[in-house]
Amino acid sequence: MSEKHQPSTQPDATEGAQDQPEALIAALVEIERHVGQSGWDQPARLFALVRTADLVAAEPHLADQLTVTSEDALSSIEQEDFRDGEDLMTTLAQIGWSESVHGCALALERTFLPAGLEDQIPANPDEAARFVAKHPQRQDVRVVVGSLRDGSSHGLARLVSEPDELLGGTQLVPALASALARTLA
């Protein structure tokens, strides 16, 4: 089930550890906003999620640059050398994080067709990609999915056709959330 999120959602400074999903959602909203500033047609982008308190303790000079510094807040650190390669799931299966990383998130764009058109898509992967890319009913979407070490995950989505609407849910892209969770194991 998806729900709408306001892009300005931020965790409250009084939230406790049980509110990790709220901290995750706030981090994902910030990532989506950051990625969105560069427009569309971007490659996949990977982020480490660290506890903001730990980041400030290790790098005090960063405190002035952070928008949220509550104890349970999460900060994202883009992995600028990330390349998703030929197969995103294979690439993710090769990633592992240090214990200092509390979670991770991935932002990526995809094109999809509405339900009911599956039987028209060619079986050949290259032909299928061309078919979807040229179809008049295609939808372009940016998703940002994150997983934490405690097993929680969440996803956000923005359609290019609905730029002011941010959708989200825990089961938005479950296979991607699971693949991200495995990188934390």
Image: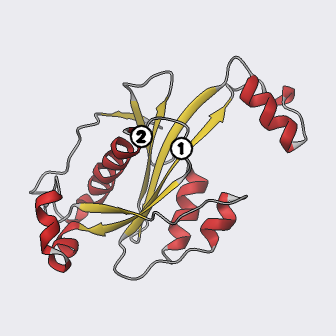
Whole-angstrom CA distance, mark 1 to mark 2, is: 8 Å
Instruction: Give residue 38's mark.
Output: 2
**Crowding near the residue tagged with mark 2, few <14, some 14–19, many ≥20 C-alpha atoms within 10 Å:** few
Q: Is residue 87 left or right of residue 143?
A: right
Residue at point 68% right, 19% down? 137
Whether 165 is drawn above or below 126: the answer is above
Q: Is label 2 in a helix, a strand or a loop?
A: loop
Residue 146 horizontal/vertical position (percent): 44, 57
Residue at point 27% right, 62% down? 74
Residue 95 horizontal/vertical position (percent): 56, 74
Residue at point 75% right, 24% down? 134
Residue at point 29% right, 36% down? 7
Return the residue nearer the eye: 167 or 84: 84
Tell me whether circle 1 and circle 2 mark residues in contact (CB < 8 Å): yes
Residue 27 horizontal/vertical position (percent): 31, 53
Identity of the amino acid at label 2? Ser
